[in-house]
């Protein structure tokens, strides 16, 4: 069962590995990212950052969609991590179970603007956000589980 889908451009790091994993009782982290799935060094660093009790899968977006739709994973408590709004959109298109997406951290880049202290979006992101909202997805911002949810559509 997917407990959380989180957009965080750092993917696996301390805040995710310890705060979110323990708060949600996560036993499986799924990193869905094309670059990391092809890079042995990045895979190793993600493995070092994960909590010892959690399983870590690093998959391409297409393979993550296949794996997340496989009924054999339904007994796991899964935290899915992507590093972009577009990747979250692609996952939500392929995995019907995804009804909510947490925006955790997206650093500024050329052409982007801050909509919260840790979330920067560009115009392409805004278009994708509108598509996800129109699809009925809840898009919320929280750095840690105890933060109050802020709806993304109210901030863009």
Image (cartoon, rainbow, N blue to C red):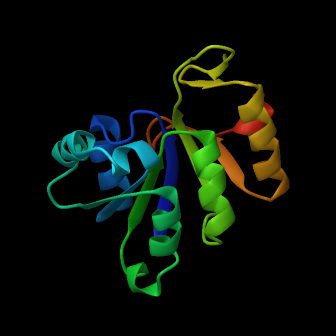
- Name which quarter of the figure residue 12 lies in: top left
Q: Quadrant of the C terminus?
A: top right
The single residue placed furthest to the right in the displayed view is: 134
Q: Position of residue 8 (x, y in %)?
A: 47, 37
Query: Considering only vertical position in the picture, is 122 above or below 15?
Result: above
Q: Nearer the viewer, residue 43 or 113?
A: 43
Q: Nearer the viewer, residue 138 or 9?
A: 9
Q: Position of residue 4 (x, y in %)?
A: 49, 57
Residue ID at (35%, 43%) = 16
Residue ID at (47%, 81%) = 70
Query: Considering only vertical position in the picture, is 147 above or below 114?
Result: below
Q: Position of residue 30 (x, y in %)?
A: 38, 58
Query: Considering only vertical position in the picture, is 84 above or below 80?
Result: above
Q: Is residue 74 visible?
A: yes
Query: Considering only vertical position in the picture, is 113 above or below 14?
Result: above
Residue ID at (64%, 55%) = 90
Instruction: Judge left or right: residue 127 versus residue 12.
Output: right
Instruction: Judge left or right: residue 2 versus residue 12.
Output: right
* Count of marks overlaid on the render: 0
The single residue placed furthest to the bottom in the displayed view is: 71
Q: Position of residue 113 (x, y in %)?
A: 68, 16
The single residue placed furthest to the front in the displayed view is: 38
Residue ID at (81%, 37%) = 127
Instruction: Judge left or right: residue 93 versus residue 146.
Output: right
Q: Is residue 26 visible?
A: no
Instruction: Judge left or right: residue 82 versus residue 16.
Output: right
């Amino acid at each position: 069962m997917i407990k959380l889908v989180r957009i965080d451009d750092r993917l696996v790091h301390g805040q995710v590995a310890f705060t979110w994993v323990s708060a949600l009782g996560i036993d499986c982290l799924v990193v869905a990212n094309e670059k990391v799935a092809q890079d042995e060094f990045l895979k190793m660093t993600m493995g070092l950052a994960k909590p010892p009790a959690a399983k870590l899968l690093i998959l391409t977006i297409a393979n993550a969609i296949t794996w997340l739709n496989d009924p054999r994973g339904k007994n796991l408590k899964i935290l899915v991590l992507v590093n972009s709004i577009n990747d979250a959109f692609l996952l939500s298109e392929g995995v019907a179970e995804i009804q909510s997406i947490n925006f955790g951290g997206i650093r500024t880049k050329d052409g982007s603007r801050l909509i919260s202290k840790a979330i920067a979006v560009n115009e392409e992101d805004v278009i994708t956000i509108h598509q996800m909202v129109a699809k009925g997805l809840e898009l919320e911002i929280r750095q840690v589980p105890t933060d109050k949810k802020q709806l993304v559509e109210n901030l863009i």
